[in-house]
Structure formats: C-alpha cells, structure tokens
Image: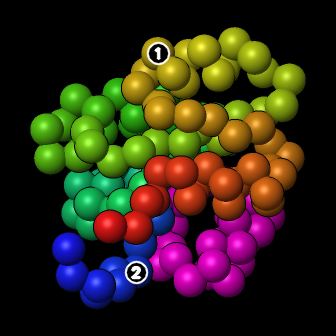
Amino acid sequence: MSASVMTKRILVVEDNPDNRILITDVLSALDYEVLVAVDGEEGLSLAKGEVPDLILMDLSLPKMDGWTATEQIKADDALKHIPIIALTAHAMVGDREKALQAGCDDYISKPIDLRELTSKLAHFLVED
Ligand code: MN
C-alpha cells in the first residue's frame, strides 16, 4: 500500500450544543475532519452526500431519531460500510441494545469519556 496519509472524516450527529462543541474540539485536536449535523434528517443527508469514514450518532434527536437514521444508513449499500458509534445516555441500558439492533457498530456512554472515545476511534479508523 502507498504511504499517503488521508485525513479521516467523522460525521457528528448531535443536537446538544455543549456535546457538539466538546466532541468537535476533541476530534479537531486529533486532526480528524469533522462534519456536523444537528438532527437525524441532516445526519442522514450528510451521510449520503459526504460518505464520512465514521459516524458518531446521538440517539435522541429532533426530526429523525438516531436509531432510524442508523437503520436507513445501514440499509443503503453505498453507506452500510461506515462504522456508526452511538452516543447513549449512561443510564439508558435499553437504548444501547436498541442501538446495536438498529445497526450501530458500538456505543459510547454520555458523559463522554475522552479516552474511551479516542480508543474506539482508533479501533474503527485503522490506517492502511
Ligand atoms: Mn440528543
């Protein structure tokens, strides 16, 4: 393989502004390119238009929830290869099971542990 370095692009779908800013700052500091969507419909639309390398998906979202957006992405042959990590509220164990059933590849509990986030990103965004 060539040694060319490609900047990985991560789509963040999150309606909470504080979480959005935190995640965006962390990802930018790690040299990822960040795309942002503030509701499920915008997330699905950006996924189709930009085909990011990974998606961080909040579940409770306006217009279209994260489970539905994930199902639609995973039903699309052009998008289903994209790893989706759900962002779940810590106490909501049932939400995680639903996220995996919807097609999410993994989940991270909120409040977000930055070491867990960076370790999961490294796992799914293996450099080739
Ligand atoms: Mn939310």
| Above or below 68: residue 43 | below
Disc 1: which residue: 101
Residue 43: mark: none
Say which quadrant the N terminus sits in. bottom left
Q: What residue do we see at 68% from left, 60% from top?
A: 118
| Above or below 41: residue 50 | below
Which mark sits nearer the N-terminus, 1 or 2? 2
Q: Is residue 61 left or right of residue 55?
A: right
Q: Is residue 103 left or right of residue 78?
A: right
- The segment highlighted magenta reads 11-38
Q: Give percent across and percent down for residue 83.
A: 41, 45
Residue 26 is covered by the magenta coloring: yes
Question: Based on the displayed image, in which of its 4 quarters is residue 115 positioned?
Answer: bottom right
Instruction: Identify the secondary structure beneath mark 2.
Output: loop
Say which quadrant the C terminus sits in. bottom left
Image region (quadrant) for ligand 1: top right
Q: What residue do we see at 29% from left, 85% from top?
A: 3
Instruction: Identify the secondary structure beneath mark 1.
Output: helix
Q: Residue furthest left?
A: 77
Q: What residue do we see at 51% from left, 21% from top?
A: 100
Q: Is residue 82 visible?
A: yes
Disc 2: which residue: 7
Q: Amino acid at mark 1?
A: Gln
| Above or below 32: residue 52 | above
Q: Nearer the viewer, mark 1 or mark 2?
A: 2
Colour scheme used in the picture? rainbow
| Front residue of this view, candidates 65 and 30 | 30
Q: Is residue 61 visible?
A: no
Q: Give percent across and percent down for residue 57.
A: 54, 45
